[in-house]
Amino acid sequence: MHILIIEDDGETREFLSRGLKEVGHAVTLVEEGREGLFQATDSNYDAIIVDRMLPGLDGLSLLKMLRATGDLTPVLMLTAIGRIADRVEGLEAGADDYLVKPFAFSELLARLNALGRRQAPQVEQSRLTVGDIDIDFHRRTVHRGGKKVILQPREFSLLAELMRNSHRVVTRTMLLERVWDFDFEPKTNIVETHLSRLRSKLNAGFDVDAIETVRGAGYMIRSN
Amino acid sequence: MPRPWKTTFGLTALVSLAFVLATLVIGLLAYALTHEAMEVQLDHRTATETSALLERAGAGGTPALAELIHQRDAGHSTASLGYILVDPQGRRLAGALDAQIPAKAGYFELLHYGKDGAIAQALITDLPDGSRLLVAADRTVIDEMDITILKLFSASFAAMLLLAVGGAWTVGAVTRSRLRRFDDAAQAIIGGDLTQRMPLDGSDNEFDGVAKSLNHMLDRNAALVENLRQVSSDVAHDLRTPLTRLNNRLDEALAFSGDKRTRAIEAAIAESHELLEVFSAILRISEIEAGTLKRDFQELALGDLVEDVVETYAPDFELSGHALHSTIHMGLRIRGDARLLSQLITNLLDNALRHTPAGTTVALNLTASEAFVILEVCDDGPGVPATERDRLFSRFTRTEASRTTDGHGLGLALVSAVAQIHGGCATVLDKPGFAVEVRLAR
């Protein structure tokens, strides 16, 4: 992917640029808001990472102006320790996702990958198959290797989120946001507990773990 | 440029002066009117006397008239009246009045007579035979009246002036002394004595009213300052430990190599994560307390929301050997923020799970009264000593018993903040075990 990074803090910019190049993305760096808007409208990027606080033109206004031109490039907005209202404002201004600084690089990468996917026009399928698992969103049924698996509604939502993001890591925070609509981290390991229940139901009678844990990053549905 | 009407003394003085001036105008007017009325009365007297004389003389003509005047003068019956009767050539026929008769007939206002400059008011009548009659009335009575009135008014004017100036000064002095005491208190507060309050004199007057309002404001500010001071010192205290640990981990990482180094770095990351969590929790609580999130409130089904969280926690309760019973009154709708309310319930269940031993039963009840939705989360665990209960909803409060478990003592502070922004409150119930009741406005 070709990614535009609009970030005034040099260290964050370098951190992002190094990490993204390492995993094979092309990166363009901009420090200032107006220049960022110019770059974003001038060239075609696969995704834009924009800081909320910028000299020249702040991230929110930049985003609004960009969206006003009809540009739908996926945007991930970054912010210093977030206020609850910040997140809402960012999403309302047209950000596709929102990440609070400081963040783990794996979290950023997982979200960026999820954004890249959204860019392709996506028809919500009623059925998905990944590896030996079939999921039917309408009937809300799951089969593994042709064998029916009975899931609780929450476990079904968890699996659905992982299935929709096959080949991609889904982080714990992403699961909390998308499955539970929690914008905070509970003290109790509810994600782990529910995943382990889902796992044991999916894996009953199988030798291979259906859900892969990516250490320090998140979870992924096994596709082979 | 000082403007006198901007000071109490100046303003009172101006108002008093206006009253004094009004008194002066009224006085002068009364004087003028009285004076005029008395002159009219004297004119009336001379006219009556003239016509009486002419009538009495009748057909007797001028000689009879002269006779009458002689009699009047001799009899002193009309002490304040004087007469002059002259023939057509101007020779005096009768009358003892020591004055010159004016040439023109009619009323004459200021007739000087006698040797000591007395003044009379006269009516001169031309008789048919060419002789002329003057009847004069002494003006002394008017002058005396004038003097009396003037004296009266001067005295009262002086008294008014004195009262006005004195009153203005007194009002000004009282106001200034009261304000000076306010100012002294304010200066003391500026000087750093935040316990200082505006003095009350118990009179319940406007000053006391203002002083009470100011004192309420000062109390409120003092509470905020105290809260802030508490938070700052708590933050400093509570962050020192994790920061020290973080520092130690990084030192270890420098000293170690291989797996041990990796573990030390992972531990350091965990420590810094913990620090960030504390920060975001503090920011979150203050954002909720600021109340601006109320704008985005939406109507929501609280029963469904509570049930969702309970369902989410059920596996963890089961795993840790706790029992979770819930009684949820469905169909309750309130205006609120779903995520904040989820966090409120999450925090209460987290607490119940982490601070009670296995085998504890936790009960969650959602009911409603007329004005509130009532969420109660209680357990039959070891509970919290009554002495520690009051502080539970403050930031960074951790009971002695919970010092050993992780957490930063912000969970219940957030519960309280969320309850408050939803028009309610959170309280610890006096029950065995530990029970929190959260009220949310319906």
Image: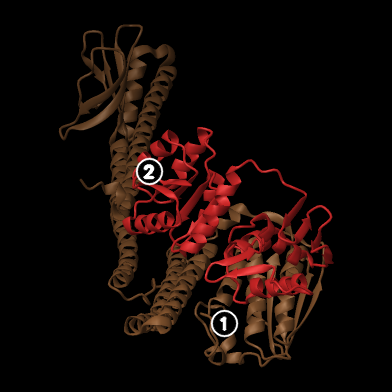
Helix, strand or loop for disc 1: helix
Q: Give the vertical position of B378 relative to B139 (above or below).
A: below
Q: Label 1 neighbourhood size at 10 Å, few (<14), some (14-19), many (20+)?
A: many
Task: Say which residue label 1 marks.
Answer: B392
Chain B: its colour in the image is brown
Chain A: its colour in the image is red
Q: Give the vertical position of A201 relative to A224 (above or below).
A: below
In the rendered image, residue B422, in percent from the top left (x then y), is placed at: 64, 63
The amino acid at mark 2 is Gly
Q: Is residue B351 visible in this depiction of the protein?
A: yes
Judging depth in this view, the residue of A64 and B373 nearest the camera is A64
Q: Are marks 1 and 2 in contact (CB under 8 Å)?
A: no
Task: Say which residue label 2 marks.
Answer: A33
| Residue B317 in the figure: left or right of residue A48 | right
- Residue extending farthest to the top is B129
In the rendered image, residue A174, in percent from the top left (x then y), is placed at: 59, 61
User: Do marks 1 and 2 share a chain?
Assistant: no
Between the C-alphas of marks 1 and 2, the distance is 45 Å
User: How many dots with numbers?
Assistant: 2
Q: Nearer the viewer, mark 1 or mark 2?
A: 2
Q: Is residue B237 visible in this depiction of the protein?
A: no
Judging depth in this view, the residue of A109 and B68 nearest the camera is A109
Give me the disc on residue B222: none
Judging depth in this view, the residue of B322 and A212 nearest the camera is A212
Give the letter of the chain under mark 2. A
| Residue B90 in the figure: left or right of residue B293 | left
